[in-house]
Image (cartoon, rainbow, N blue to C red):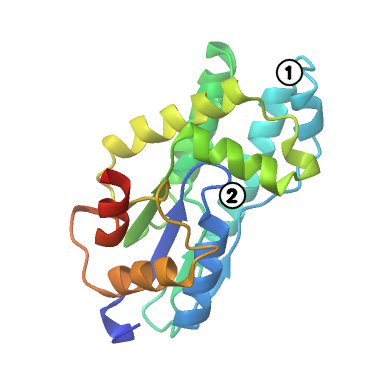
Amino acid sequence: MGNLFELPRYLAVEGPIRVGKSTLARVLAERLNAQRVMEPEENAFLQAFYDGERGAGFQAQFAFLIRRFEQLRSLDLGPHSQRAVVTDFIFEKDKIFACLNLTDQELDTYNRYYTHFRDQLPTPDLVIYLQATPEVLKRRLKKKNAPAEKAINEEYLEEVIRAYEHFFFHYTSSDLLIVNTSEIDFVERNEDLQDLLRKVSAPIKGTQYFLPLGRQEAASA
């Protein structure tokens, strides 16, 4: 991947479900010999939330908030650390879902803790935001057919996609690479993965967009 010293020490991959963020984070961590931090999946309140139980949304969101804070708070990013860090989430992701799922009263309480926790956490040097159209993500959800994801309906998925797009349209906290994965598939096609890895290995400043030229031509054909 070129010279490792050119790469960020703290790199985060983000995007909605089934966009490929965990796969890319794993590959990047392997290539960089980096510490990989994966988003927490287990949540004792999640099924109750999917079942529509009253108050379960707040309980599930608060459990995620605490776990994500604990994970990122423990990162070793000091001046003497020899390893880069790759995560498949950013802390702000928690608030994206809180705004979608909590009532105004719940969100007021949530925000007090969120702000307190966020002030204690490091900010990524580079965020890779993976995006895809609702149609592409719906197909990937059906193909994966994971039991925990069957409760995700199409309307909620579209809300999540819109929330991500709005958030990253205004995001300035880190250098940002936006990758539209609707026309590429770095999970199934190695050439797409190699193109993306070459892009990530180059310096990225501000906000940049990435779609391999070959895929652009195919998409416009």
* Residue 6 horizontal/vertical position (percent): 26, 79
Instruction: Return the residue nearer the eye: 78 or 175.
Output: 175
Residue denoted by label 2: 68
* Residue 132 horizontal/vertical position (percent): 43, 42
Instruction: In the rendered structure, find residue 217 and report the number of the disc placed on it.
Output: none
* Residue 20 horizontal/vertical position (percent): 53, 54
- Residue in the picture at 72% in, 38% down: 149
Q: In the rendered view, does 83 fall on the left or right side of 213? A: right
Q: Residues within 10 Å of mark 1 (few under 14, many from 20)?
A: some
Q: In the rendered view, does 108 fall on the left or right side of 216? A: right
Instruction: Return the residue nearer the eye: 13 or 76.
Output: 13
Find residue 162 and report its image quarter.
top left
C-alpha distance separating marks 2 and 1? 20 Å
- Residue in the picture at 75% in, 25% down: 49
- Element type where label 2 sits in the image: helix
- Residue in the picture at 43% in, 68% down: 193
* Residue 24 horizontal/vertical position (percent): 50, 64
- Element type where label 1 sits in the image: loop
Instruction: In the rendered structure, find residue 55 and report the number of the disc placed on it.
Output: 1
